[in-house]
Amino acid sequence: MYKISFINYFKRKSGISKIYITINFFHLLLFTAIYICKTGFDAYAQELKDSTDLNAALFGTNFKWGAACASYQVEGAWNIDGKGPSIWDNFTQKKRKIHNHENGDIATDFYHRYKEDIALLKDMGFGVFRFSISWSRIFPEGTGKINLKGVEFYHHVIDECLSAGIEPWITLYHWDLPQALEEKGGWTNREIISWFNDYVSFCTKEYGDKVKNWMVMNEPAAFVGLGYMLGYHAPGKKGPYKFLKATHHACLAMAEGGRMIRKNIPDANIGSTFSCSQIDPYRNDPKYRYKDMGAVKRMNALLNRLYVEPSLGLGYPVDALPALKRIKRYFEPGDEDRLKFKFDFIGLQNYFRVVTKKSLFTPFLWAKQISAEQRGVQMNEMKFEVYPEGMYNIIKQFSKYDIDNIIITENGACFKDSVENNRVHDPKRINFFERYLEQILKAKNEGAPVNGYFVWSLTDNFEWSEGYDPRFGLIHVDFKTQKRIIKDSGHWFQSFLSDKENK
Ligand code: NOJ
């Protein structure tokens, strides 16, 4: 567009020969500018990275490097082109649920800006993009009628990735359940297994020719625990029985979802992602240690084992957390088998360590968490402890299962960022990545089957009940203008990843 009007302008003004001179001059200027920027950009990225010997080549040539995002956190366009409302559209309208009463109505406007974001991802040297599909953009009412514009949108995103040489990795459920289904009980209604299966079936038939890497769910422990037990997240439900019911249905739907992908895309690489944390006792004094070790065992069952073990054929970890026995009342004949599915990879998402002590004030769990703030340790803006060794230990813990392939599907940190002269200096985030990646490499070198790493997140975005304050992105977003700036950490990755090809 720009070039055509430029040519026409000169044609009208000054005749043909002058056009060529001007075009050549224009091109010369343009190429010089690009060259200067590119050289400056590369040198700057190199300078940021020179502080460490760490580079992508050390992880091997087949290691996947990507960045991730999720539909509700970035897309915006909440009611555009036929999309139906999700539980997050509804929840964010309620009073006192979200910091500053913010919402994802516009978010980072990924719906209209996906091309720019994918181009920036490519600029930084990543080869993989993880994003999720909004169920209610495809099925506005959760089941039945299909919204063709929504279907088309994800084709565009996928095609953009493919033409940029980026591998699309799709998450089918990253927490934005269609509101219409929540009105029928959401994850507490057993029918959700078949609603979800129909949605998975549609998406995999529709996109399966182009997309081979699929994740069924994102962090069931988080969306069930926060959404159906504690009420902090959508749909804001509370109580142990809702929690157990939703847990069982989510685990069944996850395994059934895996089977459906396998049926529709026989050569797919299928996974699901799990939040996980190293868990330590608070007190080391022998008088209390054994009590706190009991708390560790129960916390570990709840936070690390509950959602992954049924798929591995190990059932629910009732041995460590007896309160889980009550989940049996939601079982139907055949469920034990239906819970199993052999995933091709397990996605691990590690953000913090949990330190716990025995407590009589927490029914069922009898354990409470001692926050990073109380312990006075290094934290990010969401008060998550920065504890890189926790990444190593959790990889080792999961490596003991019968798992062939582990992908770190999310890891990252939110720190306060500020823009100065069009740059965002974020040394704490760079330091975070260096230290966490060192621990992953250590685990890998000791034989853990870790084969990929995704930064959370590609861009700053809507951080659920925390609103827009916590910034996790490699790309800074000005939420008023939607202007994007690659942060220093993004430049750091650019250099870190370019070493992959040099070695
Ligand atoms: C994990 C979730 O998958 C993601 O949506 C969230 O933004 C990050 N944790 C950071 O809290």
Image: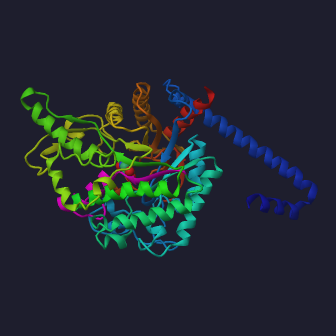
Any part of residue 465 in sight:
no
Q: From the viewer's perspective, is residue 189 above or below residue 432?
A: below
Query: Which image quadrant is residue 192 in?
Result: bottom left
The residue drawn where x is 58% and y is 29% is: 499
Q: Is residue 200 left or right of residue 299?
A: right
Q: Quadrant of residue 468?
A: bottom left
Give coordinates of residue 149: x percent, y percent. 55, 70
Give the image location of residue 280, x and y in percent: 21, 34
Q: Locate the C terminus and report the quarter of the image it occupies.
A: top right
Render colour scheme: rainbow
In magenta, the rendered stretch is 212-241
The residue that appears at 87% across and 62% down in the rendered structure is: 11
- Of residues 412 and 367, the one nearer the viewer is 367
Front residue of this view, candidates 165 and 499: 165
Which of the 4 image quarters holds residue 442?
top left
Is residue 240 found inside the magenta-colored segment of the image?
yes
Residue 377: image location, x then y, percent? 26, 34
| Residue 26: image location, x then y, percent | 80, 49
Q: Quadrant of the N terminus?
A: bottom right
Above or below: residue 170 compared with residue 33: below
Outermost residue toward the front? Answer: 333
Q: Is residue 246 above or below residue 313?
A: below
